[in-house]
Image (cartoon, grey):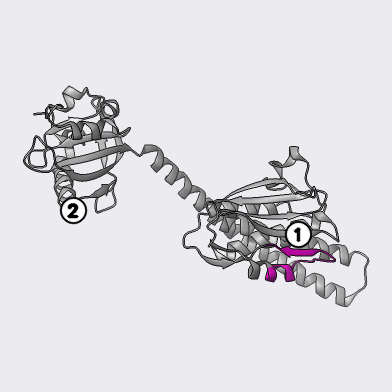
């Protein structure tokens, strides 16, 4: 029997304040003693109908014993979040019309004023969309792995052969075409490497470590054809990041600034606030109507660019959970701001 709301105001207040479907049941009998409006909408029963059935009726009838064991086990081990059985198979709920949907149950015990024993408090969430996104992400990762394999082996191997032949050709004879050939092969190698970086490193970062940007940027600056460019590091910044991907971000931004800002460009790196870092230059800048387009693969204002550098920067930032925004620096150049960064 449902507790009197007047006697059990704490229980009623708890469930009515939640936007999620809540089912409260007697752990000994399985009888549902209280539900909220969200449960009525999720399962397709009225609240009165829900209070007249047991909690196992919300799961597939042909697997009742399996769900009964799940219910008993997780009530003993509560609090628990349940979305799978021990074998990895999905937990399902069933609507009044018999439609099945995958569900996550956040379960724990509560004490009801009108009951002698603790009650099962279950928050039910339909996770159909979550599982769809997970499957789609898995398919994307599988396609990226296949693509990376093709680029790495089917393209890079013959490219290496061609580069080696070009070196031998240069040693055996003189031709005005050899320099152009080697330049084209080098550009192909850049495209292959950038494409592999984009495919392999765009996935979500797992473990992050302290990364000192001063040291990382200093090493990257040595590898970039800086010409007469100037580097100014405004703050000593240590962030939480994947070291290799942080280096890729710095390399691409520094190279982009030098390639597009001119021989005497000045590049500045600093901390804007407690969660924001920036890279900016005093070059010619980027027209505002192109600020979104610069992150598209293939976009480049330089004739010899791969068009993948800033796309890589964006993907690697997103893999860390950061947001990146392109604006204008005080001197009129480009300014890239990363927000949501864990700065130590």
* Extreme-bottom residue of the structure: 171
Task: Name the one closer to the observer, 234 or 190.
Answer: 234
Asked if one can make out residue 94 in the rendered structure from this viewpoint, the answer is: no
SS for callout 2: loop
The residue under label 1 is: 267
| Residue occupying image coordinates x 35% and y 39% | 127
Tell me which corner region of the image, top left, top right, bottom left or bottom right, holds residue 171: bottom right
* Extreme-left residue of the structure: 116
Q: CA distance from mark 1 to mark 2?
A: 56 Å
Whether 228 is among the magenta residues is yes
Task: Nearest to the eye among marks 1 and 2: give it.
Answer: 1
| Within-10-Å neighbours for mark 2: few <14, some 14–19, many 20+ | few
| Residue occupying image coordinates x 85% and y 57% | 262
| Within-10-Å neighbours for mark 1: few <14, some 14–19, many 20+ | many
Image location of residue 144, percent across then percent down: 55, 53
Q: Which residues are magenta?
A: 218-234
Asked if one can make out residue 275 in the rendered structure from this viewpoint, the answer is: yes
Side of 166 where 78 appears, left or right? left
| Residue occupying image coordinates x 9% and y 34% | 114
Image location of residue 272, percent across then percent down: 63, 53
Q: Earlier in the sequence, mark 1 or mark 2?
A: 2
Image location of residue 225, percent across then percent down: 79, 66
Tell me which corner region of the image, top left, top right, bottom left or bottom right, holds residue 176: bottom right
Tell me which corner region of the image, top left, top right, bottom left or bottom right, holds residue 266: bottom right
The image shows residue 281, relative to residue 93, as above or below, that is below
The residue under label 2 is: 77
| Residue occupying image coordinates x 22% and y 50% | 79
Image location of residue 234, percent across then percent down: 69, 62
Task: Name the one closer to the observer, 173 or 72.
Answer: 72
SS for callout 1: strand
Whether 46 is among the magenta residues is no
């Amino acid at each position: 029997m449902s507790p009197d709301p007047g006697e059990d105001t704490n229980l009623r207040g708890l469930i009515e304040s939640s936007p999620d479907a809540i089912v409260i049941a007697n752990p000994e009998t399985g009888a549902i003693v209280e539900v909220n409006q969200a449960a009525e909408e999720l399962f397709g029963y009225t609240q009165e109908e829900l209070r007249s059935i047991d909690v196992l009726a919300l799961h597939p009838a042909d697997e009742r014993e399996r769900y009964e064991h799940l219910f008993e086990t997780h009530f003993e081990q509560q609090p628990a979040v349940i979305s799978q059985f021990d074998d990895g198979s999905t937990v399902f709920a069933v609507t009044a019309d018999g439609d099945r949907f995958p569900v996550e149950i956040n379960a724990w015990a509560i004490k009801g004023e009108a009951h002698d024993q603790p009650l099962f408090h279950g928050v039910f969430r339909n996770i159909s969309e979550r599982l769809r996104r997970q499957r789609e992400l898995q398919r994307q990762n599988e396609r990226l792995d296949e693509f990376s394999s093709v680029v790495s082996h089917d393209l890079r191997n013959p490219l290496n052969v061609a580069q080696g032949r070009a070196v031998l050709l240069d040693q055996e004879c003189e031709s005005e075409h050899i320099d152009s050939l080697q330049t084209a092969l080098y550009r192909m190698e850049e495209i292959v490497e950038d494409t592999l970086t984009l495919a392999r490193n765009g996935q979500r970062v797992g473990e992050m470590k302290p990364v000192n940007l001063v040291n990382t940027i200093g090493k990257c600056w040595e590898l970039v054809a800086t010409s007469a460019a100037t580097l100014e590091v405004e703050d000593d910044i240590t962030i939480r990041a994947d070291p290799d991907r942080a280096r890729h971000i710095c390399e691409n931004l520094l190279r982009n600034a030098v390639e597009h800002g001119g021989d005497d460009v000045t590049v500045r790196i600093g901390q804007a606030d407690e969660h924001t870092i920036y890279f900016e230059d005093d070059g010619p800048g980027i027209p505002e109507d192109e600020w979104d387009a610069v992150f598209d693969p293939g976009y480049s204002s330089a004739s010899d660019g791969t068009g993948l550098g800033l796309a890589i920067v964006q993907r690697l930032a997103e893999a860390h959970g950061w947001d990146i925004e392109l604006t204008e620096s005080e001197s009129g150049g480009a300014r890239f701001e990363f927000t949501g960064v864990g700065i130590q």
